[in-house]
Image (cartoon, grey):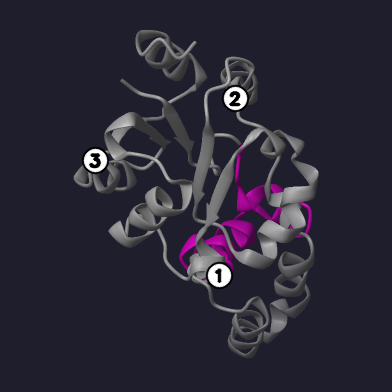
């Protein structure tokens, strides 16, 4: 019987799109595409998710691409503009689960500094019992260690827990230690899953 629900954050609860910020700074589409493929990229960003200091990352990237210094610095100060808003329907599911007193948790690959700026803008997380932030722990999904840490810190049983994520590798890792997984492809499918588990 599933008693606990563990959410991913990015692209499950909230959208994340680098283009949403940088389209405001770079008018030429070809240049924008090049910039997002070579300068501020998801791979570069994920270093912060893993615990690397943002200042060190920015200084290194500016040294490599000095013509884009202002854009790189904008990213460090305007990260929240890469989050256009909630994923449609997802926050309503969280609220419905909370109304039924389902314990709610999250494991998110998120830089600590960026989380500190984003979290106050998202009161939905007040409904969560606890949240593991990769940048604080210096471990990222799909490393099994972050799931083991979550089970220990949340004080929950793997077989009684459902993990929701949009990345197959992250789901596979959770299932490897006994957590039931749901590969997120939209709120409608998640709602069906939760109804089948009698959580809604």
Distance between the Cα atoms at labels 2 and 3?
22 Å
Up the image or down, 193 lies above or below 32; here it is: above
Secondary structure found at label 2? helix
Question: Which residue occupies the extreme bottom position in the image?
Answer: 63
Report the number of discs. Answer: 3
Up the image or down, 131 lies above or below 32; here it is: above
Identify residue for label 2: 94
Percent x, y for residue 95?
A: 65, 21
Look at the image and say whether residue 125 sits in the magenta stretch: no
Distance between the Cα atoms at labels 2 and 1?
27 Å
Mark 3 Cα shell of 10 Å, populated few (<14), some (14-19), many (≥20): some
Magenta stretch, residue numbers: 14-43
Q: In this orientation, does residue 21 appear?
A: yes
Front one among 50 and 97: 97
Up the image or down, 32 lies above or below 170; here it is: below
Percent x, y for residue 109?
A: 50, 55
Q: In this orientation, does residue 41 appear?
A: no
Front one among 36 and 52: 52
Mark 1 Cα shell of 10 Å, populated few (<14), some (14-19), many (≥20): many
Which disc, if any, is residue 112? none
Nearest to the eye among marks 2 and 1: give it.
2
Percent x, y for residue 65?
A: 62, 83
Percent x, y for residue 179?
A: 29, 38
Could you tell whether 116 is left or right of 165 in the image?
A: right
Identify residue for label 3: 175
Mark nearer the N terminus (2 vs 1)? 1
Front one among 53 and 4: 4
Identify residue for label 1: 48
Residue located 68% across and 67% down the image = 113
Answer with the quarter of the image where residue 32 lies: bottom right
């Amino acid at each position: 019987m599933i008693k606990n629900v563990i959410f991913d954050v990015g692209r499950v609860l909230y959208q994340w799109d680098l283009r949403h910020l940088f389209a405001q700074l770079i008018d030429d589409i070809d240049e924008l595409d090049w910039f997002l493929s070579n300068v501020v990229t998801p791979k570069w960003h994920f270093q912060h998710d893993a615990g690397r200091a943002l200042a060190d990352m920015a200084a290194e990237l500016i040294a490599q691409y000095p013509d884009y210094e202002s854009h790189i610095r904008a990213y460090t100060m305007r990260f929240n503009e890469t989050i256009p808003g909630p994923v449609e329907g997802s926050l309503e599911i969280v609220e419905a689960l909370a109304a039924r007193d389902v314990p709610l948790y999250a494991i998110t690959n998120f830089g600590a500094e960026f989380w500190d700026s984003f979290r106050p803008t998202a009161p939905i997380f007040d409904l969560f019992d606890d949240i593991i932030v990769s940048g604080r722990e210096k471990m990222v999904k799909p490393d099994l260690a972050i799931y083991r840490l979550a089970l220990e810190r949340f004080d929950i049983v793997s077989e009684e827990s459902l993990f929701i994520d949009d990345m197959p590798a992250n789901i596979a890792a959770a299932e490897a230690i006994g957590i039931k997984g749901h590969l997120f492809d939209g709120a409608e499918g998640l709602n069906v899953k939760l109804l089948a588990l009698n959580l809604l």
